[in-house]
């Protein structure tokens, strides 16, 4: 298959997903904004396309020859608008350039687990509507993958927004990458489905932070702080998810010594 990954250079799970698709034998294109990053993509056997996600004219023409587009855009203040315009641009180009008898182009939208059925945090309250636009687009074979969040610490102490007692749905990036590969390869039979891509169990925020203090040698005990912005409000939301993916990696608490050592080695 030919797969275009949008948002490749922003978050780690996009790198893992693109690499996993390459290892599975697929031709993978990655959108990047600079020639410097293009060299990195080429070194990973990913075909670089230099352009801005917000300017579809620079890259959308390739849609006519693709099997799958993965929208993994994130980490930007205008992600809401970009999600909407990217879907619209891909759908319009697919309709205009692909013959009627061709299989539908698969469009995988990367959402998240921060928006429950009722009362989603303000930061992500728009995502359910975008998910519905994706799976009901008449031109595309829409699929939604909802990855959960990950954790981290800095400044020699462990502080986390929220209150004690929270629970988080989590997933290792390798397991999430495997989910993208499976969704791409099984796209004809899973079109229109929204997947919660997370571990089969949630983890206690208290246990995660206590383990992080232990393995990192942070000063003192962990502490909770009052959320100071919309991102931290969303981050502190408890997530209880029914998963679709059986993980192959240890959970965060059990595997934290290994995960923390890997993170520290890259700093």
Image: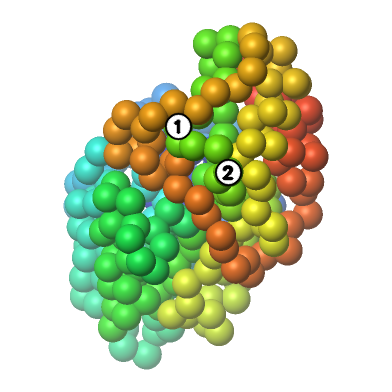
**Residue with the most extreme bottom position:** 101
Residue located 69% across and 61% down the image: 200
Quarter of the figure with the C terminus: top right
Quadrant location of residue 25? bottom right
The residue that label 1 is drawn on is 161
- Evaluate whether residue 237 shows in this view: yes
> Closer to the camera: disc 1 or disc 2?
2
The residue that label 2 is drawn on is 165
Q: Secondary structure at mark 2?
A: loop
Residue located 66% across and 47% down the image: 203
Q: Is residue 39 above or below residue 196?
A: above
Residue 186 percent across, percent down from the top left = 60, 76
Residue 67 percent across, percent down from the top left = 46, 69
Nearer-the-camera pick, 140 or 202: 202
Q: Residues within 10 Å of mark 2 (few under 14, many from 20)?
A: few
Residue 168 percent across, percent down from the top left = 58, 48
The answer to whether residue 38 is left or right of residue 223 is: left
Nearer-the-camera pick, 86 or 133: 133
Q: CA distance from mark 1 to mark 2?
A: 12 Å
Residue located 50% across and 28% down the image: 224
Quadrant location of residue 189? bottom right
Residue located 39% across and 44% down the image: 234
Quarter of the figure with the N terminus: bottom right
Nearer-the-camera pick, 189 or 208: 208
């Amino acid at each position: 298959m030919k797969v275009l990954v949008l948002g490749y250079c922003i978050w780690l799970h996009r790198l893992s997903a693109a690499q996993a698709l390459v290892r599975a034998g697929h031709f993978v294109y990655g959108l990047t904004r600079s020639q410097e990053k293009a060299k990195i993509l080429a070194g990973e056997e990913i075909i670089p396309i230099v352009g801005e996600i917000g300017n579809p004219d620079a890259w959308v023409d390739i849609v006519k020859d693709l099997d799958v587009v993965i929208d993994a855009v994130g980490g930007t203040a205008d992600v809401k608008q970009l999600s909407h315009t990217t879907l619209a641009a891909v759908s319009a180009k697919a309709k205009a350039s692909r013959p009627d008898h061709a299989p539908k182009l698969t469009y995988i939208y990367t959402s998240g687990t921060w928006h429950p059925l009722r009362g989603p945090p303000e930061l992500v309250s728009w995502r359910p509507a975008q998910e519905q636009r994706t799976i009901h687009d008449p031109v595309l074979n829409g699929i939604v993958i909802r990855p959960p969040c990950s954790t981290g610490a800095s400044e020699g102490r462990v502080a986390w927004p929220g209150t004690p007692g929270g629970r988080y749905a989590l997933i290792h990036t390798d397991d999430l990458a495997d989910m993208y590969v499976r969704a791409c390869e099984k796209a004809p039979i899973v079109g229109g489905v929204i997947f919660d891509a997370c571990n089969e169990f949630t983890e206690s925020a208290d246990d995660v932070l206590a383990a992080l203090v232990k393995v990192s040698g942070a000063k003192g005990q962990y502490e909770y702080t009052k959320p100071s912005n919309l991102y931290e409000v969303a981050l502190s939301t408890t997530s209880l998810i029914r998963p679709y993916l059986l993980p192959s990696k240890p959970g965060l608490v059990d595997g934290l010594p290994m995960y923390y050592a890997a993170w520290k080695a890259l700093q």
